[in-house]
Amino acid sequence: MEITITSNYEEMSKVSAQIIAEEIQRKHDLVLGLATGDTPIGTYQELVKIHKEEGLDFSKVKSFNLDEYLGLAPLHKNSYNYFMWENLFKHININPENVYIPQGNIKDPEQFCAWYEAQIKEAGGIDLQVLGIGRDGHIAFNEPGSSFASRTRIKALYKQTIEDNARFFDKMEDVPRFAITIGIGTIMEAKKILLIANGKNKAAVCAQFIEGPVTSQITATALQLHSYVNIVLDKDAASKLERTEYYDWVRDNKHSVQKEIGR
Ligand code: GLP
C-alpha cells in the first residue's frame, strides 16, 4: 500500500484527481469504480477542472458506482445517483450509457445485484476503484462482518452508519436501513485501488485499517491483501498513524528507489 499524506483536503483532492486523470490518459476506455460521500466531492471538482481546462476526455470511460440506498428512486435528492450527476457526471463528457449505478427502487434487487456483477465482468472488470471509508471501517456499504468474498448484494446498515447518514435527511425515520452494495470480493478484483480520507473523525479508523490486523470487523483491512492500493489522506486523517515518517520517506524517495532498481 502506498500512503500519501497531504496537508489538507484541497491537496488530497488534487493528488487523488491527478491519479485518476493519469489512468484515464493511459487508457481512454478506463473502467472506473466510483464512490459517494463528502470525501470525494473535492476530487470530482478537480476532475471537472482538468476536463474543462486540459480536455480530460471521459467519452469512452465506463463507470460503476459502489452502492445505493435501497428504496430510493434515482431522482431522489438523497440518492447516490443524484449525487453523482450533480457532483460529476453533468459537468463532464461521460456517455450516460456508460454510467452504471445500482438502482435503489428496483423491483427485484437480488436479480439486479447479479446483473450488476455481470455488467462489471462484461466490461472487463474495474481498472481503478475509488473508495472512501466509513467510521466503522466500511468500504462501499460493506459493514462490519461482511465476508471478504462477498459480491453485490443487499446489506443492512450499521447503527453508526445510519447516524452518519442522518445529516442528509430531514427525519431520522427517513434514513434508509438497507443498501445495495458491491462486495469486498468485487472490490478486491479491481486492478488498482485508490482510497481517500480526510478529517479527524477518520483518524482512528485509518490507523486501524492501515496498521492494524486484517479483520472482517473493519472491512477496509481487506485492502492489505490487494497488490495495488494508493491511499491519499489529509494530515488530520493520518494523525493517528504510527509510521508516517516511513510513508513520507518512501513517497519522497520513490523516484530514486525506482532508479536504483532500474525501473
Ligand atoms: C457511505 C458510502 C461510502 C463512503 C462513506 C463515507 O457510507 N457508502 O462509500 O465512503 O459513506 O462518507 P463520507 O465521505 O461522507 O465520510
Image: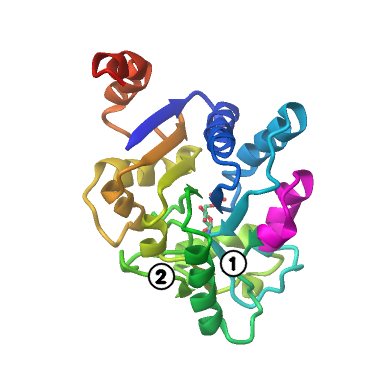
Q: Residues within 10 Å of mark 2 (few under 14, many from 20)?
A: many
Residue 128: give x, y in percent of width and height: 48, 47
Is 242 one of the magenta-colored residues?
Answer: no
* Residue 166 lies in quadrant: bottom right
Q: Confirm if mark 1 falls within 8 A of ligand 1.
A: no
Q: Is residue 183 above or below residue 248?
A: below
Q: Confirm if mark 2 falls within 8 A of ligand 1.
A: no
> What is the span of residues highlighted in magenta in the rendered image?
81-98
Q: Is residue 90 left or right of residue 217?
A: right
What's the residue type where badge 2 is placed?
A: Arg
Residue 245: give x, y in percent of width and height: 29, 21
Q: Residue at 53% across / 62% down in the picture?
A: 163
Q: Residue at 73% across / 54% down in the picture?
A: 95
Q: Is residue 121 above or below residue 251?
A: below
Residue 114: give x, y in percent of width and height: 49, 77
What's the residue type where badge 1 is placed?
A: Glu
The N terminus appears in which quarter of the rendering? top left
**Which dot, 2 or 1, sits closer to the camera?**
2
Q: Is residue 242 above or below residue 170?
A: above
Query: Residue 68's mark?
Result: 1
Name the element at disc 2. Answer: loop
Mark closer to the chain start, 2 or 1: 1
